[in-house]
Image (tube, grey):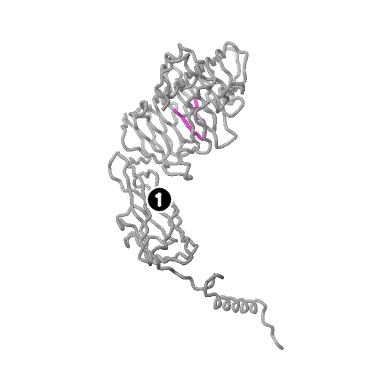
Amino acid sequence: MTRSIPYYIVFFFLLSSVLSIASSCDDSGLLGFGDEKFTQDPSRTLTFSTDTLRFDTIISTVGSTTKLVKVFNFNEDGIRIVSVRLAEGKKSMFRVNVDGEYLPRSAGSIAYDFEVRGGDSLYVRAEVTVDERNQNEVFDVSDTLIFYLESGREQKLTLTAKGMDAYHWREKVVDQDTTLTAGRPFVVYDSLVVAEGATLTMLPGVKLFFHDKAELRVHGTLKALGTLGNEVVFRGDRTDRMFDYLPYDNTPSRWGGIRLFSTSLNNEFYHTDIHSAQFGIVCDRSELDEMKLTLENSVLHNIGGHGLKLEHCRALVANTQISNVLGDCVYQIGGWSEFVHCTFAQFYPWEANRGMALYLTNHLADEPYPLYHAHFVNCLMSGYPDDVIQGDLDEVEGEHLDYFFGYSYLNTVETDDAERFVGIVYDNGEQALPKEKNFVRFDTYNFLYDFRLKESSGARNIGDVEVAARYPFDRYGMARTLDEGPDAGCYEFVVKEEE
């Protein structure tokens, strides 16, 4: 009995024969099966996607993210690379992988024998860890990646980075009065805790970089004493970029936030910059006979929760911008607060289901929280929603319910409550520049914002003069008394001098 040969074996041999014939007849390699020709002509070179690979500012001893360069061979013939090496050799702070092969530092940061066929390419991946220099100033780091071709030609790719030394704090507890001075930043891992009875004071120019989810948890007292042009900064520790055009520092929820616990009183924030956190400042419930929070000439921006949450406590906020938060710019539960010349801008770009510019309530679940005083004077409140001021206020006989809006620019429904709303300009779409069009810069591609006023904004010249006298200069130090009247919000319009 004759056995038949399986069809797949016949197919395999036929395919092998065809490939063999095609390969023997294809001296030029047009079918892709001929011998690749490699040139030794020194005029034939590689092309790099960039001539300089730049890293953002890197915190010393902390490794960078990986950056990529593509190396093209646009020639018809292949090019052999004899070696690729870092000029600094073993001393180099950069780590490089070429076409999947690591350049080992132990061997002098060099690797050998690469081929780039005609019309093909390979990838170079690089990282850097900057050595500590024990200095406050930012410093430059560089190296050169040298490609030595079989033709004898050398080609170079420059690698650069900026280094920054920092103090690294892990599980840090401040249990006695402590003062921080400007210089290198403080990188906070886990969380930074200020114990009850202790005061942490930050002088002008202090910068705190918080790792993912790390918080500043205050049971004692915090004093952030920045000055104009030399602010105290609270931000995340990612100094690199999500995309070429977008730094991580321009995105929300890079770190936890600042929480002032019930025992924390007399906290002061002057000229502070708090941005890109999961929440801004959360104030737990405290007695109203002492100030819980004074917040002046500051900014809370790009927050993944509430910007400022006040739970039945006493707070004074002035000349301050609270903007682009997923929750509410200000969420107040009862208590006592006063806001003077503040800008609440609710233009959070990352989700459509964002909160309000202001939310007021005098109860939490079934527990009452009397609203003793919530006054907003010479303020600007705007945002994407049609009405950015909301609340849940129960008028109960015998309980305090005192809220007031005066001489402000409000994106809300017009009301006939003449006692609680005085001198209001409503941003209801009929103004010359409603909503985001009031402001100088609104770049939703690069997520860059400038909430200073345009000349034709409806918020100009509507503030109360006597109230403005308490804060005669805006957040940038511009005088409020040089034109027809003070503007609503934390910024006074200033005509730019022609260049």
Q: Which residues are magenta?
A: 299-311
**Residue reaching furthest right?**
1
Quick one: quadrant of the C terminus? top left
**What residue is at 35 percent from the left and 40 percent from the top?**
169
In this rendering, is residue 389 above or below 404? below
Mark 1 = which residue? 53
Query: Is residue 362 at all visible to an observer of this figure?
Result: no
Q: Amino acid at mark 1?
A: Leu
Instruction: Check if residue 155 falls in the magenta segment.
Output: no
Along the line of sight, which residue is nearer the eye, 475 or 205? 475
Left or right of residue 17: residue 87: left
Q: Position of residue 298 (x, y in %)?
A: 43, 26
Residue found farthest to the bottom? 1
Q: Is residue 11 above or below residue 386?
A: below
Report the predominant secondary structure element of the magenta stretch.
strand
Say few, some or many: other residues with alpha carbon within 10 Å of mark 1 (under 14 / 14 to 19 / 20 or more): some
Q: Quadrant of residue 473?
A: top left
Q: Image quarter for residue 228?
A: top left
Q: Compared to 308, does 16 lie above or below?
A: below
Image x and y of residue 327, in percent: 54, 31
Q: How many marks?
A: 1
Q: Helix or strand or loop: what does disc 1 sit on?
A: strand
Q: Is residue 455 left or right of residue 7?
A: left
Name the residue nearer the viewer: 466 or 178. Answer: 466
302 inside magenta stretch: yes
Would you say residue 129 is visible in this rendering? yes
Instruction: Give the x, y percent position of residue 11.
Output: 64, 77
